Amino acid sequence: MWHATVAYDGTAFRGWQIQPNLRTVQGELQKRLRLLLGQPELRLTATSRTDTGVHALDQHINFAAPCSPDLSPESVRRTLNRWLPKDVQVRDMGFAQPDFSARYDSVGKAYTYVVYNGEKCHPLFSRFVWPMRRELSVPDMQEAAAHLVGEHDFSSFAVNPKREIATNVRRLFRVEVSARNGFVFFNVVGASFLYKMVRSIVGHLVYVGRGAARPDDIIGVLNARDRSAAAASVPGVGLFLAKVFFEKDEWQTYEPQLPPFGWQD
Amino acid sequence: MWHATVAYDGTAFRGWQIQPNLRTVQGELQKRLRLLLGQPELRLTATSRTDTGVHALDQHINFAAPCSPDLSPESVRRTLNRWLPKDVQVRDMGFAQPDFSARYDSVGKAYTYVVYNGEKCHPLFSRFVWPMRRELSVPDMQEAAAHLVGEHDFSSFAVNPKREIATNVRRLFRVEVSARNGFVFFNVVGASFLYKMVRSIVGHLVYVGRGAARPDDIIGVLNARDRSAAAASVPGVGLFLAKVFFEKDEWQTYEPQLPPFGWQD
């Protein structure tokens, strides 16, 4: 099984998942890989099916295709990068075990959400943040965030929770809030997530941060198991899929990368 | 006279200068200032009429409008920023002398051009760089750049040099090349510039950097006083108007800001 990591600026994509007549990350990658490998049926699987506007620093994908000595993963990666537009990049490519699944073998994911909390974000960063002028209390958001760590029923923090799914119980390893130069970063690390869970959590933390609810009210919101008990979710523009974990406990030593990430390449 | 500084992501603008039915920075600013100040004839003057796709960290503008105790520059700036789209920001606003001109009172400008010299730029930075896969020799470009410092006839480095202008002699204070993490930065500081002069200079330095000409060939290119003696110019995507100087010798202590500029706000 082939295994690759991908980064993208989500602004001009209608999310990860392929859709007819819409520009999606899966669509852009898959059509080029099919041509490049001569595999018209090739299909990509990703760890996270990111929504419209959501960015990724470390999306993982897998696909089945024959191995050939003429086509090393490194040469495929290089050619693919030349063929791809500049808002998506393949960062690594290699072979995994035959049964590897980027989706089912991952044991955790880290998301970073970025709010610009000030008058106006610098135009060079504005496509990667959600702007919020009203001053947010970081200590209050930190206090509320701490109540979300651990195993809980997150029905109150999932948009359209899928009732057919057996449970809305999920485990969050870390929910952290920090601020720097007007930017507020939300680092949410968990084993798995419900639909729009990170954006719903950040939406409620921002609600707490601007004083509309007390930090420990979030306990009652969790217990309500009802989406309408929590505040509205925040838009995709500030959300990054920051890291995917395949090793147990890898999340413990993870250092959140804070967009726009200085000069790492 | 009012005096303001403006930053913008040039990607979605057809440059600074107002044009009918095209989205320009002057157009976006001017129509909102006219409404806000109730001055339908208000006109903006900028230090640099940046081209399509060119970014600005420190564009300076001036405009004539009545002063009123109800409309402090600070309150105008705040309202204007709320009204403006997210790719342009007014950073400072105040009153200058009645005869102040952002264009004619400036004594120098610093431009930064950014090349991504590697396989593929990270998607978060790709809208602010010109990509060049072939490896560039920084020492060769530095050697060539040194020949451009000082007063020269820059006819070879101006696209469509305006023949009606008395002279194509210009003074460059600094032409510096540095590299970091795959990015190559060109810092060009001068008293004034011919049309597309920075992009023509960088185009030729890149030509030297990839070994197509020897560094000291640039002396002959300068002496030719003929645009066709130099290599093609580079596109606007990597160009930033980085700083405008109004004080003599201010350029000497200027520290180039390297996009994406870490976390300054």
Image: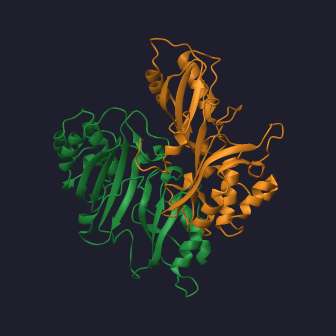
Chain colours: A orange, B green
Q: Is residue A123 above or below residue B226?
A: below
Camera sees residue B2? no
Between A250 and A180, the one lying in front of the other is A250
Image x and y of residue A99, in percent = 61, 19
Q: Is residue A253 above or below residue B168?
A: above
Viewport quadrant of the C terminus of chain A:
top left
Between A251 and A234, the one lying in front of the other is A251
Residue drawn at 50 percent across, 67 percent down: B90
Image x and y of residue B213, in percent = 22, 35
Between B6 and B234, the one lying in front of the other is B6
Camera sees residue A191? yes
Residue drawn at 80 percent across, 37 percent down: A165
Between B7 and A204, the one lying in front of the other is A204
Of all residues, the one furthest to the right in this rendering is A163
Left or right: B79 with respect to A71? right
Residue drawn at 66 percent across, 37 percent down: A49
Q: Is residue A64 above or below residue A203?
A: above
Q: Report the number of numbered marks.
A: 0
Q: Is residue B228 above or below residue B86?
A: above
Image x and y of residue A44, in percent = 62, 26
Left or right: A209 with respect to B202? right
Left or right: A252 with respect to B156? right
Image x and y of residue B85, in percent = 59, 60
Of all residues, the one furthest to the bottom in this rendering is B69
Q: Quadrant of residue B241?
A: bottom left
Viewport quadrant of the N terminus of chain A:
top right
